[in-house]
Every structure is written in structure tokens, then in C-alpha cells.
Amino acid sequence: MTVDEAAQSAIADASADTSVDGINRTVTVEVVHKQEGFGTAAWTVIGMFLVVAAVGSWFMLSGDSANGDGGGLFGGGGNCGDGIDNDNDGLTDREDGDCYDQVNPEWNGYKSGHMEDGRNDPPGGES
């Protein structure tokens, strides 16, 4: 027996009981629909979470930043080779110690991972 047939049977039984007594009674049936699965509000929350996660990931992994350090969570391209004193130490590119490898202190050209950030300058600013 399906759910609809069971409901119709219950209504018929209730109606039969009222007619036996000879009293005119009214049977009121309230049908409540229970929604299964996620509702609209749940999908809206999930969608908003995904949008926030996507935008946050884009900001963390993008190569642009306001402070000019290449940006991104994992860093970005370096700025050695642009002819500008990016860390304001008076030295540009070839003259700046930040543009050299620490293990190989020779100019090997522009390296995307090198950054004029003042972290690899000699003590006292001497070169």
C-alpha cells in the first residue's frame, strides 16, 4: 500500500466512524510536507562559502601585492633586473647583494626568485 492509499484509507475510516454515531462531524486533514535533503538556505550558505574560499585562494596565490614584494602566499617573481633600487639601499640589481645567490656570489642574470628586499645585503650596507 502506498502512502497516498494509506492516507485515503485513514480518512475513510475517520469519516465512517463519525457517520455511525449519527452526529454530523467534520474531519480536517492537515498535510505536512517534509522536505528531504538540503533546503535553499543550506545551498545558499554552501555557495557563499565556496565563493569566499575561491576569492581567498585567489588573493593568497596571486602574484600582485600592494607592498611590491611579488605577493602571493608562495612569493612571486623577483624584481632583480628591473634597473630600480627596490629596497632603497642605494644599490640596483648587479650592485645589490639581494640579487646574488648566497652560495654563488656572482651575477648570474635575472632570477625570478630573487628579490631586492634588503635581506641579503652585507652588514652596514657595504658592497
Image: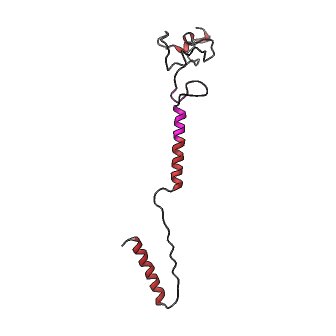
Number of residue marks: 0
Image: 36 above or below 113: below
| Residue occupying image coordinates x 54% and y 10% | 94
| Residue occupying image coordinates x 53% and y 51% | 44
Image: 3 above or below 117: below
**On-image quarter of the C terminus:** top right
Of all residues, the one furthest to the front in this rendering is 82
| Residue occupying image coordinates x 63% and y 16% | 88
**On-image quarter of the N terminus:** bottom left
Q: Position of residue 82 (x, y in %)?
A: 56, 16
Q: Nearer the viewer, residue 118 or 6?
A: 6
Q: Position of residue 118 (x, y in %)?
A: 59, 17
Image: 58 above or below 89: below
38 falls in the magenta region? no
Question: Image quarter for residue 79?
Answer: top right
Q: Position of residue 116 (x, y in %)?
A: 57, 17
68 falls in the magenta region? yes
Q: Which residues are magenta?
A: 53-77
Image: 105 above or below 60: above
**Colour scheme of this structure image?**
secondary structure
Q: Position of residue 20 (x, y in %)?
A: 46, 90
Q: Main secondary structure of the magenta part?
A: loop
Of all residues, the one furthest to the bottom in this rendering is 22
